[in-house]
Image (spheres, rainbow, N blue to C red):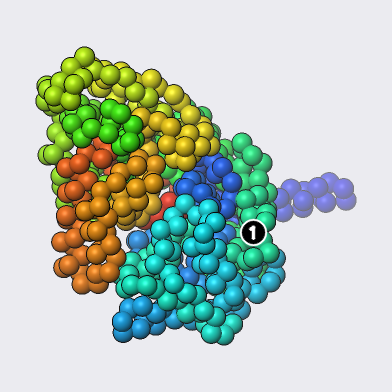
Amino acid sequence: MMQNTSRLALLASTALLALPLQAQAEQSDITVALQLEPPHLDPTSAAAGAIDSVLYANVFEGLTRFSSDGAVIPGLAKSWEISEDGLTYTFMLNEGVTFHDGSAMDAEDVKFSLDRARGEDSANAQKALFAGITDVTVLDPLTVQVTLEAPNGSFLFNMAWGDAVIVAPESVANIKTAPIGTGAFKFENWVQGDQITLSRNEAYWGTPAALTDVTFKFISDPTAAFAAMMAEDIDAFVGFPTPEALPQFEADPRFQVIIGSSEGETILSTNNMMPPLDDRRVRKAIAHAIDRSAIIDGAMFGLGTPIGTHFAPHNPDYVDLTSLSQYDPELSKKLLAEAGFADGFTTTLKLPPPSYARRGGEIIAAQLRAVGIETEISNLEWAQWLEQVFRGKDYGLTIVSHTEPFDIGIYARPDYYFQYNNPQFQQIMDTLNRATLPAERKALLKVAQTIIAEDYVNGYLFQLAFPTVAKAGIEGLWENAPTQATDLTAVRWSD
């Protein structure tokens, strides 16, 4: 009798192993790796795109949002009406939306969030997005009216940024460590230096996520990134930092490699107020000392599109101005001599953690050295870079990729970290904000791109590619990065 029982148990176990995969428990959790860890978890008070990489669409939502193709689509607002004069936007909110703590999200929360972002004491890194708002009025719990001082053709676009997400007043005190949003996933835990975990929001107002649990792992070292992916310790690496390894993953049936485009203009950012970088001839000399192709090949192994201004090449209004800063070291030396620096000079080159910056920095340092410019390289952690460079403006040169969408408007802010002050450019951007006709906007954008290229505000290097390596069974990952986000709301494991 004991022998028969054991035999039946063995047969049952064998039969279970023979069941098709879909008949067994489907995987519903995922571990996604990113190179950069957020400095904190409040997207409305920091410039770090790493915050949005974890939280955008997953935990926090705005009135509008970006879809995977970059289109602006409804978010917490299901619809809106725009007055004939373009000054009033009336947003109709979705019904039944709650924050992760169970409290209702309504028009009062929208008013609080927009007023907080535009307030005098606002810490919002993109406060300029809200500068044109003169009033936010609650009409009823599901209707809010926003009044602008002037028409703004980019207003709905601006409301889709991660800096414009809606938060509850009672959650703000702890938002940096315990974020509470309305998204398809809830924040669970943050082990600093290691990982952030999310869980599915079972009370989500929209289409529920297929995944039940999400772990974001932070792996800054490119070699460790390759090892973790190859060992299948992680399920996907978004923004994979080791481009030279991509062919190896492409040849391995366990993985899929997705190479898309991003909004990341990678620049040799220049402190326009620090001598001698405040001299246009010096900035032009730096631009002509840079061999973009050598940087793209050496740092990115061919992944990247050369740019000559701060604008994405895939945008239909992009103007190719790379000829204004072609590689010409002899011209660079001549310009330096004209500016009084025939023997060169020394400046700082402060590099954040991404591999494009660290690898690219070594190449650029050598190129600048060849024309007489010495650089003192400092490798900074992300929090240090934000403190010293972005907020403190204590730098000569740095390398960073600006991943915010359509962000040429930052050049109209004299107090922005590269401290460029050009009233003509500021007027162009003010006119652009008021323009609604596509032809007029296209013409203005051409002028804007040309001004900053001819002023050599920064060294324009390349548009950052967006490579993702993932296990073969994952569906729904974004191919491109229209904003810095890892939207997992539509991700699932295939049957």
Amino acid type shown at disc 1: Val
User: Is residue 125 something that shows in the picture?
Assistant: yes
| Residue occupying the point 37% across, 26% down | 349
User: Is residue 72 something that shows in the picture?
Assistant: no
Q: Is residue 23 left or right of residue 466?
A: right
- Seen in the picture, residue 3 relative to 475 is either above or below; the reply is above
| Residue occupying the point 25% across, 64% down | 432
Q: Residue 51 appears at what percent x and percent y?
A: 52, 49
Q: Secondary structure at mark 1?
A: helix
| Residue occupying the point 24% across, 69% down | 435
| Residue occupying the point 45% across, 57% down | 127
- Residue 344 or residue 235, whichever sits in front: 344
- Residue 296 or residue 287, whichever sits in front: 287
Question: Residue tagged by mark 1?
Answer: 172
Q: Quadrant of residue 251?
A: top left
- Residue 391 or residue 305, whichever sits in front: 391
